[in-house]
Image: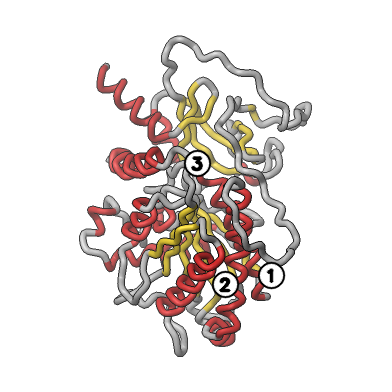
Amino acid sequence: MLHQRLLTILGLLLCFVLSMDGAKKTFTLCIDAGHGGGDHGAPGKFSKEKTLTLRYALAFGRMVEQNCPDVKVVYTRKTDKFIELWQRAEIANKAKADLFVSVHINAVKKGIVRGYQTYALGRSRRDGNTHGYEENLEVAKRENAVILYEKDYQQHYEGFDPNSPESNILFELMQDKNMENSILLAKLMQKNICSATGRVDKGVHQDNLAVLRKASMPACLMELGFISTPDEEQYMNSDRALSQYTRGFYNAFVAYKNKVSPNINVPYKPAPAEPVEVAEPQPAPNPVVEQPVEQTQPTPQPEEQPQQPVEQPKENVAPVFKVQILASSTKLKQGDAQLKGEKNAAYYREGGMYKYTVGASTNYQEIYNLRKQLVARFPQAFIIAFKNDVKVDVNEAIREYKSKKVKK
């Protein structure tokens, strides 16, 4: 069964997250140079992606090592060798890294495209902040296609087929608690690297890239530029570009680290730059109550106002499963085009976003079947779970559901 294979994979990821709890004196950064060995990556006229990614990854790491004595830098590779995708994230997981950054170079088959873009883990969405689900899916397929180089890839990825749109859902249920920091990191990378290099800002995106799905910490993937565009290839092979990208990367890293780990001192400060407007990472989940989609606006409540503690019931309430179909920075009115005719949608607030769901049942199989019906209209749809109106880890909720089902 699909959900049984999914539980096996995500169960391993959960173990890594639990093992990382607790204070750490040293901040560990894992830098991944994409591709390598027999996997050349995207080809240019006179250079290869695997060579450029290694060059930049080593330069990024050296900059951090030279200026941040309290940071340990771990590399997935320092030479031209092939490393399987699951092993790249595994290196970061075993090192108990606080941050995982994967370096890549973009390419298109036809036309001239320029610019820098950053990816964080998430679902592809058709909205104003992305180039569309289809383009993001193509990037995901290209980056995930390296799986086919690996021996026994069906065993490691539970039959994941990068050429099947259905398979992109396999690993979607990643831990939510790292999502906010991943997006924060991606925004800082996008801002600082574009500022340092003068590259076209291609924006921050979210997608189901395998190398990010398997990491148990905040992570992002950088596409430095388009090797298929002659002037960008020429620029990325220059010493000037190496210096500029490294400065942008380092400034972004320092800004991120100072924000999420203020107790760790960084003696080197980047050159003054305009502050980046980003949402603060959310604390441990508070009770969230879904609201039906209405045309009238509710009385606004200040988000800063602390909620009263909720007394937990004595009995063990079964988790409630729902299908999340989309997220919006603003509240949608009934009949909004983004809802695609879905009249039974409800929403909850999280991370400053309105997140819309369909269905609510303690029967996981029922919601699993509902999601299969919804993916035609909402390709990004995925399952979430609540207990006592508090959002919980969906993997634990599924395990609880299955254990109770077995007992019955």
| Residue that label 1 marks | 195
* Of the pair 9 and 374, the residue shown nearer to us: 9
206 is higher (above) or lower (below) than 393: below
Q: Would you say residue 34 is visible in this rendering? A: yes
| Residue that label 3 marks | 176
Residue 147 quadrant: bottom left
Disc number lying in front (1 or 3): 1
On the image, the x and y values in percent for residue 14 come to 37, 40
- Label 2: few (<14), some (14–19) or many (≥20) C-alpha neighbours in 10 Å: many
At horizontal 52% and vertical 84% (from top left) the residue drawn is 237
Tell which circle, 1 or 2, labels the residue nearer the N-terminal end. Answer: 1
* Of the pair 360 and 307, the residue shown nearer to us: 307
On the image, the x and y values in percent for residue 105 come to 49, 73
Q: Would you say residue 166 is visible in this rendering? A: no
Label 1 with label 3: CB-CB less than 8 Å: no
Residue 293 shown left or right of residue 209 in the figure: right
For badge 3, the amino acid type reads: Asp
Disc number lying in front (3 or 2): 2
Mark 3 lies on a secondary structure that is: helix
Residue 388 shown left or right of residue 368 in the figure: right
- Label 1: few (<14), some (14–19) or many (≥20) C-alpha neighbours in 10 Å: some
On the image, the x and y values in percent for residue 364 come to 39, 29
For badge 1, the amino acid type reads: Ser
Tell which circle, 3 or 2, labels the residue nearer the N-terminal end. Answer: 3
At horizontal 40% and vertical 56% (from top left) the residue drawn is 165
| Residue that label 2 marks | 246
* Of the pair 354 and 30, the residue shown nearer to us: 30
Residue 72 quadrant: bottom left
* Of the pair 355 and 54, the residue shown nearer to us: 54
